[in-house]
Every structure is written in C-alpha cells, then in structure tokens.
Image: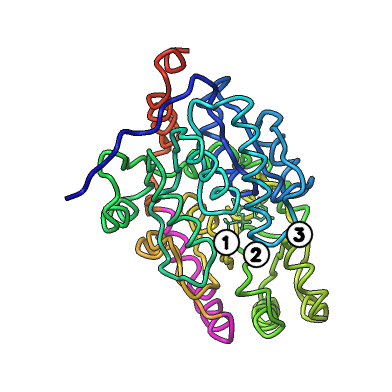
Amino acid sequence: MTVHCLPPRPGTGRIAVVLGTRPELVKLAPLIHELGPATRLVHTGQHWDEAMSGRFLRELGLPEPELLTGVGGRPRAGQIAASLEQLDAAFTAERPGAVVVQGDTNATLAGALAANAHGIPLVHVEAGLRSHDRAMPEEHNRVMVDHIADLLCAATEENVANLRAESLYEPSIELTGNTVVEVVRRQLPDAASRAVLLARYGLRPDGYVLATVHRPENTDTAEALGAVLTELGRIAADTPVLFPMHPRTRAAVERHGLEPLLARLTVTGPVGYGEFLGLARHAALLVSDSGGVQEECTVLGRPLLVVRRSTERPEAMDAGFATLVDPGPELGALAAEWLADAPERLARLAATPSPYGDGLASVRIARLTLALTEPALSAA
Ligand code: UDP
C-alpha cells in the first residue's frame, strides 16, 4: 500500500526561483515574467559572468537576482554544498511561498534540497526527463529532484510516462508543455535583424552549419574533443561551420593542445541568446551536445545531429528533427548526407510541429505554482 503524507506547509513569501546556469535563465524567463512581482530570483552563481549570465539577464528582461557566492568553478559536491548552505540561510531569513527549480543542474538539486529541508512546496519544471545514463550527473540530479518535488511539470507525454513508471504521486504530475516554445518565439530576432546578423558573419541562409559542444563526454579527453573537431573541420571543407565556443570547451582545447583543429572553423565565444537563435534559424544543419538545442531545433524547424551517446529528449528524434551520432567519422558522414538533402529536409521540418507544446507552458506552470501558495499570494 502506498501512503502519501500531507504536502509541505505553504509559506506566505514570494516564490523563490532558484537557478544557476544559462539554460535555466533561458527556460525560466517566461515563467518569471508570468509570476511578475511574486518572483524572488536567486542565482547560485554556477555560471556567473557577462557572457554566460549577465547579458542573458538583460536580454531576457529578468530582475536583478540575489547572488550566492563561492559556488562557480568548484567540483560538483562543493557547488551543491555551498549553494545549499546559503539557500538555507536565505530561506530562514525570508521563507518563500514555494521554490521553483528547472532541469537537472547542481543549482536545481541545491534549490530542491533547500526547499525540502524547510518543508517549502517544491516545483520542478521539466520533470520526468530520463536518459537512463547513470554516468551523467544530470540524470542523478533530475531523478532526485523529481522524487522530492510537490509539483512535477512534465513537458511531454513521454515525461509523464517516465514519472508514472517510477510511481510518483499522480496528483503531483501535470502535463504543461515546455517553456522553450514561448522563449524561442519571443527572443528570435525579426527577419531584417537576422539578415544583418548573417551578413556580419558572411553567411547565407541555409548555407552553413552551426555547432556547439561542451559536455564532459566530448571535452574531457583529447581523443573525444579531437574527434569532434576533426569531423567539424572535415565538414568545413565544403560548408562554413560557425562554432561559438563554450568556456569549458575553450579551456579543453587549450589543455589538450588542439588549436590546429580549429583552423577551418569560424570560432567565436558564446553568443547572446537572440543571436544564437537567429543563427540557428537559418543553419542548414545544427551539430550540438546541448539539451536546450534539442528542443529549440523543433521550434525553429532545423535538423540537428546530437553528438551524444544518449538523450533524455527522445521527442525531437521521434519527430524527425534530430538523431544521435557518434563523435567520430559517423558525424562527418551523416552531416554530409544531411547537407546533401537539406532542401527537402528543411521543407519537411518547416511543416512539422514541435513536440514541446503550444507556447502556453509558462502560463500553466505559473497558475499551478501560485495555487500551491497561500490564497493571499494567488490573488495578488
Ligand atoms: N546558447 C546561447 N549561446 C551560445 C550557445 C548556446 O545562447 O553561444 C543557448 C542555446 O540556445 C540554449 C542554451 O544556450 O538555449 C543551451 O545551454 P547549454 O548548452 O549550456 O546547456 P544545456 O541546454 O545543454 O543544458
């Protein structure tokens, strides 16, 4: 017999939205806008610099966050411990009505543990993703957070099924859609600005590849990163490859002495969100190991080769937008194949709806979150 206890005691304070990385800023932005003045934004500082955070806060129109200190740059346990200790103090000083976390980062887990320690209702946005790859810390983070959350906002039917398969409490599970749909629609620059952007890089619509890699499986060893960069270089012999480099990847290139493999690529630092979307919108092909890009490609109607051994986002694959690919010669071979039939592929994907929802996820999540807090706050 399953026994479910009473949910945690709601507080009267504002809703603490705890985040720490670029993808959390992106995907929580629409929800923060919906919650408006009820939001208390807390940034753990996991990614805290102008390129990965500062300009995203401004571009996405987010409020100035409470910033934790001494978190970024530490190993995983240290990040979680340092964030948790400071969140504990912050929630003691002012008890939030609810805590919202998103995804699977160390900030997500720290925010969830702090809410749990205080008995504050916990909302998990993007609940139910599963790669079943236990070598990925993100898989552990998302499983742990789902198991202590009071409201599980699942983006897709697959995500709902994953939560049910783990016997999570049925009334806590809500199918909301993914906020990525609305954030892409809002932040994609208009056609004229995109034309200026492409001209700046000397690119022609449907005539280039946009690539990003940053995950440990592709950057930790010289062999793995060397294999990806070799294949990108091979693609660039025929088609321009734009490569906005994540700080972790830049450090790995330097550490492994792989600079010569960048020679054929157009390398930049990480670009702002609108710029990234504008470039992705007209790419003949995307190559990435990012989680967010696997969703964004479905809203932008662009094909994606996912340089990973597993994914927690099978929807983009099932809908025909993406496929997993090995970082070695398979990457170059499949890229050549997909670039060769780009016109038909792009036409087909332009007519394929995104599996991530209708663009109203943030409205649903805000309503459900406010309902978890005291009536006074819901009516505000
Ligand atoms: N992104 C960006 N600029 C870049 C590269 C990526 O704005 O130069 C965005 C991308 O559109 C996506 C997010 O950053 O929304 C992905 O972040 P990341 O790959 O760091 O994390 P993941 O999605 O893998 O968790």
Residue 340 drawn in magenta = yes
The answer to the question of whether label 1 and label 2 lie on touching residues, with beta carbons closer than 8 A, is yes
Q: Secondary structure at mark 2?
A: strand
Question: Residue tagged by mark 2?
Answer: 212
Mark 3 lies on residue = 202
Residue 18: x, y in percent? 59, 39
The disc, 3 or 1, on the residue closer to the chain's N-terminal end is 3
Q: Are marks 3 and 1 in contact (CB under 8 Å)?
A: no
- Residue 29 visible, this orientation: yes
Left or right of residue 211: residue 119: left
Q: Is residue 343 magenta?
A: yes
Q: Give whichever of discs 1 and 2 has the lower sequence position.
A: 2
- Quarter location, residue 176: top left
Q: CA distance from mark 3 to mark 2?
A: 19 Å
Residue at left 26%, top 53%?
A: 167
Mark 2 Cα shell of 10 Å, populated few (<14), some (14-19), many (≥20): many
Which three-letter amino acid code belongs to the residue tagged 1? Answer: Ser
Q: Nearer the viewer, residue 29 or 7?
A: 7
